[in-house]
Image (cartoon, rainbow, N blue to C red):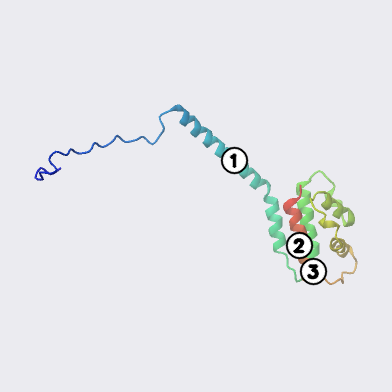
Amino acid sequence: MSKNNILLRDLIDPAIPEMTPFFPQTIGWKIAGVFILCSSLLVLLRWWRSYQANRYRRIALKAIARLPKNQPNYYLTVLNSVLKQTACHCYPHSSVASLYGEAWLLFLQSKSNSNMFSSSIAQQWQQAIYAKNRNQEWTPSQLRQLELMACDWIKQHR
């Protein structure tokens, strides 16, 4: 402080407190920190495994999104193929690859939480794929409905 000011002569400089350590000093906080770190790593590892396990779903959904809707017959066939590949990946030791028509729809229905594949549009879809003459006209809304059914199955099958 300044020695020239009479009013400040009796005041003393404040004491600066000691630095508080950043790391806790007690063992309990160290144990809690290690527990939190390990728990966080475990949660991150589980998330990563789940993310990797669902990679096939993301690939299938991207494949469906890239399908050209201006060629309905091609679209229907490839949509069926993507669903078959997804099902074969999920259930490798089953006879999924040989299923078609009504049996294929029943399989999809059995692995789904909803009854979306029991609709008439699903029946028409399977008949159109395996029909000799593919002259049936498909509206964009029907193709969109089939796409939504396939995407829902890919996202939610068990």
Which residue is pictured at 74% across the width and 57% down the height? Answer: 151
Distance from Cα at disc 3 to Cα at disc 1: 44 Å
Label 2 close to label 3 by CB (< 8 Å): no
Which residue is pictured at 76% across the width and 52% down the height? Answer: 86
Q: Quadrant of residue 2?
A: top left
Indicate the amino acid at tag 3: Pro
| Direction top: furthest residue | 27
According to the picture, the residue beneath numbered tag 1 turns out to be 43
Q: How many marks?
A: 3
Indicate the amino acid at tag 1: Val
Decide which of 103, 73 is in the foreground and name it: 103
- Drawn side of residue 86 relative to residue 22, left or right: right
| Direction right: furthest residue | 132
Q: Label 2: how many residues lie within 10 Å, few (<14), some (14-19) or many (20+)?
A: some
Q: Mark 2 vs mark 1: which is more N-terminal?
A: 1
Q: Quadrant of residue 145?
A: bottom right
Q: Mark 3 vs mark 1: which is more N-terminal?
A: 1
Spot occupied by residue 99 in the image (x, y as percentages of width and height): 86, 52
Spot occupied by residue 157 in the image (x, y as percentages of width and height): 76, 50
Q: Quadrant of residue 125?
A: bottom right
Q: Which mark is residue 72?
A: 3
According to the picture, the residue beneath numbered tag 2 turns out to be 147
Spot occupied by residue 73 in the image (x, y as percentages of width and height): 81, 67
